[in-house]
Image (cartoon, rainbow, N blue to C red):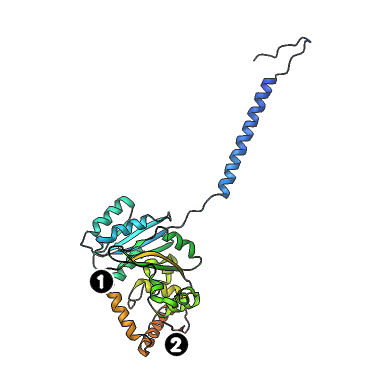
Amino acid sequence: MNPARPTSTGKRSKPVKRVEITVALANRGILCHLFRMHENVVSLFDRTPALPLISVALATFNGAKYIGPQLDSIYSQSYPNVEVVVSDDGSSDGTLDILERYKAERGLKLIKQKRRLGYKDNFVEAIKACSGEFIALADQDDLWVSNKLEILHDEIGVDFLIHADVKMIDEDGLLIAQSARHMNFGDLHDRVFLDRDYHRRSVLTRKSLCQGCTTLFRSTLLETALPIPAAEQAHDIWLAFVAAAQDKIRYVDVALVSWRLHGSNTSQIADKSEMKRSLKGSFIHGLYRRQQYYRRAIVLKIRGISMSLYPLRLRDEIF
């Protein structure tokens, strides 16, 4: 190590350069340490929590014509954490080939039923195989808007189940109606759907207010909803009833699904509408609604949920 050279006065000069380097290195170490501390603090307070998993439960049977576009609309959702669970009820039209492709390419979870279960029980098998904190129901022939799951997840709050409106399209995808709810209910829409208490009571006393293909529900709802009683016509009607029985149902007034009408489902809607028109306001119709309500209330009573008397007075049954 070279000593500092003596000056003309005979004194040694100060090792200025060495001091400057030492100070610079020290400052650099302090700055690096402070930078690391800053990064740690930022990561601590700016850490975005992982979004909960949403499982999409889909039941298929001979749906090859429309299942591809529907799956594309599901996999294109803006909500990032999604699994798709499909239960197939013995399709013979090429549906399984399409599902196998999505299984290989997109990780779709496929359950092949060994015997025909029917619409309701096939959906139940898909629901039971879901692992998400939330479960969304999907039909094989519809189309979802790209932010459907994001909207429903953001809006569900503390409720158990949320549902929405649908657009109506024909088998070629051409628009029939911008809103099925507004079209069907007209001036009654706001009271039936936007008045939370009346909506809850209406769901408890009739079966067609909550359309399954628009729903998102918490998986904890299944603790009281399963098994679905054999007398129930459909899984989605029962799930909505159980949520409404606990005052945990919500409606969002936006069309999030293009509901495709084609073939048999169009004729079934016409038949049901004709039957409803013939019975609406009749004594028999009133008895039927009350019988349905108390049958369901007994099931929930056994499962630990107590319910009141029939929740609508005759003058309040406006539809």
Q: Tell me, for residue 247, which label it has, or none.
A: none
**Lower sequence index among marks 1 and 2:** 1
- Mark 1 highlights which residue? 264
x and y percentages locating residue 160 in the rendered image: 46, 68
Q: Residue at x 65, y 30 (%)?
A: 26
Image-based side of 158 in relation to 55, left or right: right
Q: CA distance from mark 1 to mark 2?
A: 34 Å
The quadrant in which the N terminus is found is top right
The quadrant in which the C terminus is found is bottom left
Q: Nearer the viewer, residue 251 or 226?
A: 251
Q: What type is the residue that disc 1 sits on?
A: Ser
Residue 85 vs 245, above or below: the answer is above
x and y percentages locating residue 288 in the rendered image: 36, 85
Q: Residue furthest bottom?
A: 283
Q: Is residue 21 visible?
A: yes
Image-based side of 312 in relation to 83, left or right: right
Q: Residue at x 77, y 13 (%)?
A: 11
Q: Residue at x 45, y 61 (%)?
A: 151
Q: Callout 2: helix, strand or loop?
A: helix
Q: Nearer the viewer, residue 290 or 303?
A: 290
Q: Quadrant of residue 303?
A: bottom left
x and y percentages locating residue 132 in the rendered image: 41, 60
Q: Residue at x 29, y 51 (%)?
A: 104
- Mark 2 highlights which residue? 314
Q: Is residue 226 visible?
A: no
Q: What type is the residue that disc 2 sits on?
A: Leu
